[in-house]
Image: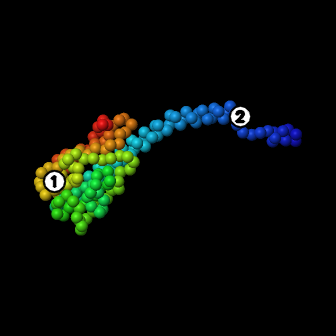
Amino acid sequence: IQMVLKMMNRNRGFTLAELMVTMAVVAIVLVVGVPAFQATVRNNRAVANANDFLTSLNLARNEAIKRGAGRVVLCPGTPAGCAGTWTSGWIVFVDTNNNGQWDAGERILQAHEPLSGNDTLTGNAPVSTYISFAADGSTRFANSNAFQAGTLRFSLCNSNNQQNTIVINSVGRARVAPQPCI
């Protein structure tokens, strides 16, 4: 019985040396792991933003082809209308009067919320205010048959110091092209 009592009276816990070794291991794991995790989060956000925009482009193009007449437009803005920058979100709608702007009564097919974090999206002159798809799937300027082609650049750099650029050719096909960060 005395042996049992002596064992029960022993203090249980960690010694100072064990605690210091554990703290050192935790510190090393944090120093190595946190930057890698942050890079992974940044890379995933860059890919997700580009994929979201590419999905909207493909929706607009496919809807224009499916309808066989008229135009389907993607423009920066909210369901209240086309305004602002691509960073503030975008809408896809059926452009019944072919003016490249959402007007009351035109059907909105998709509305996308603003980009998350500090990422921005800017388009060069041909695609800075809208992208209009004709019934054959090609991009055309509003009220015109002239081809509309351009590039849109995301500002978020991934861990390889590259940013995503979406290139839209004259037949309406879009692709993601990684570019060095500016």
What's the residue at 71%, 34% (across, down)? 15
Q: Is residue 83 left or right of residue 147?
A: right
Identify the residue under disc 1. 141
Q: Residues within 10 Å of mark 2 (few under 14, many from 20)?
A: few
What amino acid type is highlighted by mark number 1?
Answer: Phe
- Residue 83 placement (x, y as % from top left): 27, 57
Q: Residue furthest left?
A: 145
What's the residue at 70%, 37% (across, down)? 14
- Towards the viewer: 59 or 179: 179
| Callout 2: SS | loop
**Quadrant of the image containing the C terminus:** top left
Q: Earlier in the sequence, mark 1 or mark 2?
A: 2
The CA span between labels 1 and 2 is: 74 Å
- Count of residue discs: 2
Q: Residue furthest right?
A: 2
What's the residue at 81%, 42% (across, down)? 8
What's the residue at 30%, 59% (across, down)? 78
Kindly indicate the quadrant of the structure image that contains residue 24. top right
**Quadrant of the image containing the N terminus:** top right
Disc on res. 15: 2
